[in-house]
Amino acid sequence: MSVQEALAPGTTVTYLEAIRQGLWRELESDPSVFLLGEDIAEFGGAFKVTAGMFDRFGAERVINTPIAESAILGVAIGAALYGLRPVAEMQFIDFLACGFNPLVNFAATQHYRAGTPVPMVVRGPCGGHVRGSAFHSQNPEGFYLRAPGLKIVAPATVADAYGLIRGAIRDPNPVLYLEHKYLYRRIKGELPGDEGVLPLGQARLARDGRHLTVLTWGAMVHTALEAAERLAQEDGAELAVVDLRTLKPLDEALILDTVRRTSRALVLSEEPLTGSAAGEVAALVAEKAFAWLDAPVARLCCLDTPVPFSPPLEDYYLPNVDKLCARVRELLSY
Amino acid sequence: MSAGKSFGPLHPEAEEREQLARTSLSRDQQWEVYRLMRLTRAVEERLSSLYRRGLLVGGAYSSRGQEATSVASAYALGPDDLIGPLIRNLGSQLVRGVDSGRIFALHMGKATAVNRSKDNLPQTDLGCGILGPIAMLGSLLAVVAGALLADRMKGGKRVGMSWIGDGGTSTGEFHEAINLAAVLNLPLVVVVENNGWAYSTPTSQQTRVKDLALKGAGYGVPSEIVDGNDPLAVYEAAKRAVERARSGGGPTLLEAKTFRMRGHAEHDDASYVPAELREHWLARDPIARFERHLVAEAVASQAEIDALEGELASRLDAEIEAAQAAPMPAPEEAALGVFEGAV
């Protein structure tokens, strides 16, 4: 494949290319940034997110590792403590479970325990819809959300994929960057310039409306927008869609402001329901916007099962536009 | 590696030796190593006493019997090098200049200890080249490796040393870290303190290999076995490993055969350790053995050795008094410091 280097702002790119461009810009502008992970060097990564970087930035800054998620994260922590800004790739975010201990117990607690910052990013593909089965499809937000000290971002758009990877690298804390593999080559948009670098913790009002707020992130933002369009046409309902972008820290102000204006809220997530980040968002709304609500806060998530493989099974497992429209109609008629 | 050489009844082919190894250390340096070993023991004896009197918060761990391993290995490092100490490596921290008064304050949960006593593990102190551990064994090795990677990327020549017990070598993170450090050829010295017991589990229930140094071969890493109760032997072996690392030879696995003279922590009477085994190793106490060497070689007189007791006592008593008088952190500080910067 031909590998483009840094592209000009305004170029139309895929979500995947936006992540790649963001990494590239940070590698170019900050010599303390380096990458490590499995198959990321000459090969360019399983999904080619790091394509061309080994040739451009060299073996010192694009480091292939053995299959050792714990050691990858441990090395990233040590390098971050000594002033570098490592970006560790998990080939699939499911495999982050193998590095749970260093991420959750070491990286995330380090600043609290010792007062020393750990500016590192762990990124990798999450999410279903690609028939990846139980161990190449997970959305692990809930596992990591309750780890104090760890930030979590999940971009939904080309501009955010670019802005948030750069923002995550510049953040002085450990950041889990969840890129949705279904979006990798399915959505396109304009590549921002340096002004597109996003600080963490700011949600985005993806669509405004008066009747109900859908709170969501990642690939589900597109499901929510499609449902909102259908409901507008078929029911005349006006849905607001808040793209959370960052799950920790949550943008409480935008969430609560939008919910209070619309009086109804549904949290849409591609996680199994129980213990999900969606539950945390729903609890926030119930606790702080109760007096404004005209219906219970709803959660639309996946089944409480592992991610199934066979297409009809996975489709049944995942939320979709039909399911979302049905739930929204229930809430609107509550 | 010098396979087959082992020490004491834990290691049946033991060569029982009283005499210490030949050393390249000057007399002043030998005295300094001895002094740091005595300081380690004195601090830990006081921590034990404070624990028994209910004056500490949480548990207290002792490296009694392993002072030679911890101190003499760290002594082989240069002033800019890095260490990753575990709970039984107070000695290596004292070598790096950690203030013992801070240790007392930390074990009392005082506001004057590092980072307001938010954690009681050996504390990260980048100024002293110290990377603190988490409680999960094996995790620290990759972190030290990462710090060394960062140093090499910046053009530095730092070497790193970290310690782990016989039990810790069973963890997956130990394996992953040494393997990755070897592949990246990082200047990491891993000292395996084989002290016979991981809490209550004897090494024979931890692994089928007799010598943990054998594990080095599995990573393509040179290894060596050393008498962990001989500070001079530990120093020489550590120095060889440090020099190899500094000259681009990558990691070394150094197995120190030693003995944990107290329980896993102060709450543990270690009644599972056979009495005759304990007796055997008590007779090989690294500090007493070093003293006999120092006197025999006229490095120090018995009077100088005896005088050290009073000197350490007055210093540590003052430090304990200061720690006891220090304030506790304000409760609401518990909510602070989760993230760096404004969130």
Image (cartoon, grey):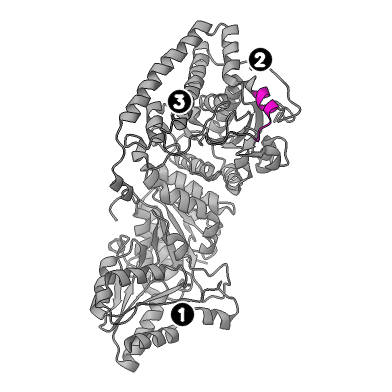
Q: Chain of mark 3?
A: B
Residue A216 visible within the image: yes
The image quarter in which residue A247 lies:
bottom left
Say whether residue B331 is left or right of residue B73.
Answer: left
Q: Which residue is mark 3?
A: B46
Residue that numbered label 1 is attached to? A319
Q: Are marks 3 and 1 in contact (CB under 8 Å)?
A: no
Say which element carries label 3: helix
Bounds of the magenta span? B272-281
Residue B301 in view: no
Are the residues at dot 1 and dot 2 in contact (C-beta closer than 8 Å)? no
Q: Nearer the viewer, residue A327 or A69?
A: A327
x then y, percent, for residue A297 = 35, 77
Which chain letter goes with mark 2? B
Q: Which mark is residue B19?
A: 2
Q: Main secondary structure of the magenta part?
A: helix
Image location of residue B98, percent across then percent down? 41, 28
- The local crowd at label 1, few if under 14, some if 14 to 19, many if 20 or more residues have their Cα within 10 Å, is many
Report x, y in % for residue B214. Answer: 70, 37
The residue nearer to you, when weighing A37 against A309, is: A309
Q: Residue placed at 40% from the left, 30% from the top?
A: B104
C-alpha span from label 2 to label 3: 30 Å
Q: Left or right: B98 with respect to B261? A: left
Q: What residue type is disc 3 on?
A: Arg
- Direction front: furthest residue: B53
